Structures are given as structure tokens and as C-alpha cells.
Image: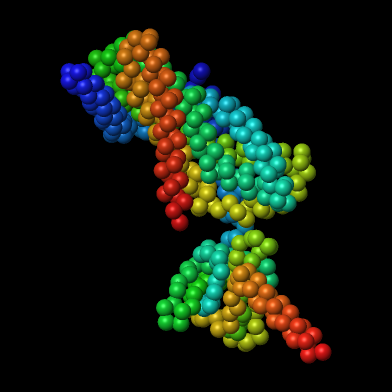
Amino acid sequence: MDRTTLDLWVGIFVAAGVAALIGLAMKVGNLTSNPIGETYTVTAAFENIGGLKSRAPVKSAGVVVGRVDNIQFDNETFEALVTLKIDKHYNFPKDTFANIYTSGLLGEQYVGLDAGGDEVGLKNGDKIAHTQDAVVLEKMISQFLYNKASEGSEKKETETAQ
Amino acid sequence: MFNHLVKSLRGIGHRVIDRIWRLGCAARFFFYTLVLSGESLRRFGLTIREMYFTGVLSLIIILVSALFVGMVLGLQGYNTLQKYGSSEAIGVLVALSLVRELGPVVTALLFAGRAGTAITAEIGLMRATEQLSAMEMMAVNPIARVVAPRFWAGVISMPLLAALFSMMGVFGGYLVAVPLLGIDEGAFWSQMQANVDFREDIVNGVIKSFVFGIACTIIALFEGYDAPPTAEGVSRATTRTVVNSSLAVLGLDFVLTSFMISV
């Protein structure tokens, strides 16, 4: 085989391989879906973060606006200190509400931001004051059972009174 | 009795020393290949020629097996996921298993069978017909002229082949999932994109295939270079190439995965 056809075939091979890599990154991977560029950092304290992990998405109105950067335990307040990196394009009011939600019934957990009505915006290094913890299924069930039990005992008391 | 014990102990010791000695030879061979690879990178035509034999000629088997692996993954995954009512997650299953594991590993195994054996047989025959000695007589270093271009060709080809394998496998999974099983196309791609991370999954897969490329190629080259210059020696060396490459790939895969998953 002469040199030019050989070069051509190897060129096709390399181009196809590189195209496959780019295709994997674009079509299969998440390189295009969340182009988070410049970010600013805010923190939020939660009493319970459930199964939240770093790199979990931060969403507002269902749109990904940032990522969880870091999760630490604050040994003075005994709360979880979550650092959020939010895209510079999005500004939120200072009284924004941070919640921990679960996507779907068994899905991953994410931080949801509900914008407040304050004129002043969140800045780099600010702390979100209003937070709501993750829903822990065991707590909910035990609360439900406790309520049911107390309802039942009330019923019995009224029956015996009659 | 005592003599017999000493003899069998000596046998074990001899075998162990032999293995370690061979490993040392392979390490020195690898080192020399790296040191003497200047020429193969300066005269890149040599490497391109070898890339045609290792990379381009492996394309058919890689692409066809990738298509079928992807299609089988799609069918099998659908069967199980359907029971939990999450058959849309089939895209994630196909893409993650291909990009993380099957792409690099199966490509490396096929590469060892298709290109590695060819390299071993070729260099083994060069040794047997004393072409390598002839080169030395002409003051041409056979490692720089014969071994290094093949090494770099294998190392460059492997990640490209693995990427093509993964892409083709995802396409195979798509063919089964969307037109055949009737899964929504949008859900298929969007779930895949939401769950496959560029850094964690795709780059790690490329790193794996790069390491496998080094391991497979250097094993094939060393076995050929070290083969006894007889017909039987070359045939044994070829077999050893496949066995050792496969074992090295699977072992390295575990080690690399355990480092990558540690987060």
C-alpha cells in the first residue's frame, strides 16, 4: 500500500476517533447541558440535609442555576453548613428560601431556591437565612404513627365517657 | 525424602526467580522503548504506518462488536428496568456501562487479540529470521526502529478505538431502545445526559483506555522481542501475549476503578 492511501486511512481513523470523543462529551455526557461559568458562593445552614451530596444541582423553578460545592458540619451550632456555587448570571433576593427537595420518589436530592421579595440581592459570601430541612422519611412515618395513635386514644376516651 | 523436599523447594524458587527476572527484563525493555522513542516521534511516518496496522485494521471488529454489545445491553437492561417501571433509564444504563467499563475493557481485549498477536508474531519472526540482528549490524537500533513506532501507534490508537467503541455501543443501545422497544427518544437522551458526567465518567474512561493501550502494546512487543527464534517459540509467545494482556487489562481495570470510585 502506498504512502498517501495509508496516510488517508490513518487520518480518517484519527478524525473518527476524535469525533467519537467529542460526540461522547456532547451527546452522551453533560458537557453541554449545564454550562456553569463564573459563579458566586453563598452558604446555607440546615439542621438536616438528608442525603444531599456535593455536586448536587441547585435549582430554582426547576432550572439548574448552580451546584453544591461543599458540605461541612458546624460544631458550634450543630448544623450542616452547605456551600452553594451559583451562576453569576442569576441574582437572587436576600430573603431567598433554600429547601432540600428530592427529585421523584427515589431520586437524588437537590437544593431548591425560592426567590423572596427583597430589593437587595445575595452577594458572594452571603448566608441564606431561611432554610428548610430535607424530609426524612422515618421522621415523617413516626410522626404519622404518633398522630394516629393519639387520635385512637382520644376516640377511646370519648367512648368510655359516653 | 529430604532430598526430594529440597528438590521441590528448589523448583519453586527457580520458577519464582525466573518470573521476577522476566518482569525485570520487561521493565528494562519498557524503559529503553521510552528512551529510544525520539526517532519514532521525529519520523512520524513510521508511527503512522503502524497505526494503520494496529488501529485502522482493528476498526471493523471493534465497531461490529460494539454495535452488538450495545444492542444486547439495551435488550437485557430493558428486561430488568421494565419491572421497576423505569425503562427510560435504559439510556443511562447503556451509556454508563459502556463509557466506564465495557468501552475500555472490551476494546483492550479485542485489541490484544487482533493487533497484539500480530505485533508479537511479526517481531518474533523478525527475531527468528535474524532481521533484528541484521539491523544491529547496520548500526540501526531495532528498539528505536521497530519497537518504538509500534508502541506509540498502539498507545495512540487505543483511546481512539475505545471512544469509537463507546459511541457505537450507545448507538446500538439507541437502535434497540427507541425504534425497537418504543422508548421515548427525548427521555432516552436527556436521562443519559443528566447522569453521565464528563469528568467523572468520560475522562476516566479515556484514562483507562490509555493505560490499557500502554499495557497491551508493551506486552505484545516484549513477548515478540523475547520469543525463542523457533516456530514453536513464536507460537507460544503469541499465546502468552493474549493471556498476559487479558489478565493485565482485567487486573489494571480493578485497580484503576478502585482509585476512581474512591470519592
Residue A7: % across, % down = 50, 27
For residue A84, side relative to residue B227 (left or right): right
Q: Is residue A140 shown left or right of residue A75?
A: right
Residue at 37 percent of width and 10 percent of height? B232
Answer above or below: position of B142 versus A143: above
- How does the figure colour the protein chain or chains? rainbow
The structure residue drawn at horizontal position 19% and vertical position 18%, both measured from the top left corner, is B1
Which residue of the protein is positioned furthest toward the bottom in this rendering?
A161
Q: Position of residue B100 (x, y in %)?
A: 53, 44
Give the vertical position of B89 relative to A114 (above or below): above
Counting the numbered discs, the total is 0
Q: Residue at x 50, y 81 (%)?
A: A126
Q: Closer to the camera, B176 or B15?
A: B15
Give residue B213's position: percent from left, percent from top: 43, 34
Whether residue A60 is visible = no
Q: Residue A37's x, y, as percent?
A: 54, 64
- Viewer-closest of A79 and B147: A79
Residue in the image at 68% along x and 74% along y: A145
Image quadrant holding the C terminus of chain B, namely bottom left
Residue B91 in sight from this viewpoint: yes
**Is B256 positioned to the left or the right of B62 in the image?**
left
Q: Compared to B166, does A38 lie above or below? A: below
A159 or A135: nearer the eye? Answer: A159
Which picture quadrant has residue B154?
A: top left
Against B215, residue B136 (above or below) is: above
